[in-house]
Amino acid sequence: MAEFFQQLINGISLGSIYALIALGYTMVYGILKFINFAHGEIFMLGAFSGFYLAGQFGITSPDITMAIIILLITMMITAIIGALIEKFAYKPLRRSSKLTVLITAIGVSLFFQYTGQLIFGADPKSFPTLIESTTLQIANVKISSNQIVVILSSVLLMLILRIIVMKTKTGTAIRAVSNNITAASLMGININNVISFTFILGSSMAGAAGILYAINYPSIDPLMGLLPGLKAFIAAVLGGIGNFPGAALGGVLIGTIETLTVGYISSTFRDAIAFSILIIILIFKPTGLLGTKEIEKV
């Protein structure tokens, strides 16, 4: 039983990171109805931003204050990158077919992967220790301070995002555009600003996820966003893409299932299980666990 709870804690920690990335997928899909497959690379750029910021600040030992500062600056950097991607890659294709935009998203993803290898180098880099790692033991279950920081930070960021979307004027505009973009435009909502702000929010969450992931798994490389990005997409589909609570639930479930697979079956099957879940959910419940059916007029 102790081993089960140990794997559960590991899964929730990993799943909370997937949830942050999945929120970016679900926000963009909720408004534009397409999947931003370059989102995983924003996650990667977040990790590298933290790596180079730590070097610029000369961090040689754990410092929680500097860790928070690096996290916030990284979120701003990735937010700007997300806004630029939307402006130069997606905005010109606003009236194009979904397939055209999808191919462009894959192209942007490949651009960042290989440009990252050119600029950062292809070899993995060791992420600096931003937070002092200690271990708390409850019964026979060990919880590291890094896991606690990751879980609490993820929950806090998701709550802040929830407040922005549900309690602010801009959040109301986001929900209006998501519900009916044409009607929202007729009501005087600036669609371009709302879409840009959505990319800013989603990209900042992915940047934070990159830092939190690197704290727990301190080895980063330009291709690190590929699998976490795909698994976060699976999490968004599992929970119900376009649904905020669904993205969070899907992320935690995928992370937990992945760690339980490693603990009880084999690490060889961790990726296969995740993609099998995608196939199963698309066959039996394509709207996801918390998603609802939408009637599309033609």
Image: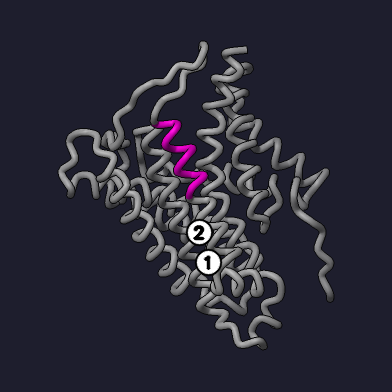
Q: Quadrant of the C terminus?
A: bottom right
Which of the numbered marks, if any, corresponds to residue 61? none
Dot 2: element: helix
Q: How many marks?
A: 2
Q: Nearer the viewer, residue 226 or 134?
A: 134
Residue 88 percent coordinates (x, y): 44, 73
147, above or below 176, in the image: above
Q: Residues within 10 Å of mark 1 (few under 14, many from 20)?
A: many
Residue 272 percent coordinates (x, y): 63, 31
Q: CA distance from mark 1 to mark 2?
A: 6 Å
Amino acid under disc 2: Gly
Residue drawn where x is 55% and y is 83% of the image: 190
Q: Nearer the viewer, residue 85 or 214?
A: 214
Q: Nearer the viewer, residue 269 or 70?
A: 70
Residue drawn where x is 53% and y is 57% of the image: 161
Please state if 256 lies on the left or on the right of 132 as rendered: right
Residue drawn where x is 59% and y is 20% of the image: 5
CB atoms at circles 1 and 2 under 8 Å apart?
A: yes
Q: Which residues are magenta?
A: 146-156
Quarter of the image where one finds residue 130 = top left
Quarter of the image where one finds residue 150 = top left
Q: Residues within 10 Å of mark 2 (few under 14, many from 20)?
A: many
- The dominant secondary structure in magenta is helix
Q: Which residue is mark 2?
A: 202
Residue 164 percent coordinates (x, y): 53, 63
31, above or below 182, in the image: above
Residue 13 makes an appearance in the image: yes
Amino acid under disc 1: Thr
Please state if 74 lies on the left or on the right of 189 as rendered: left
Dot 1: element: helix
Residue 105: say if magenta: no
Q: Which residue is mark 1?
A: 198
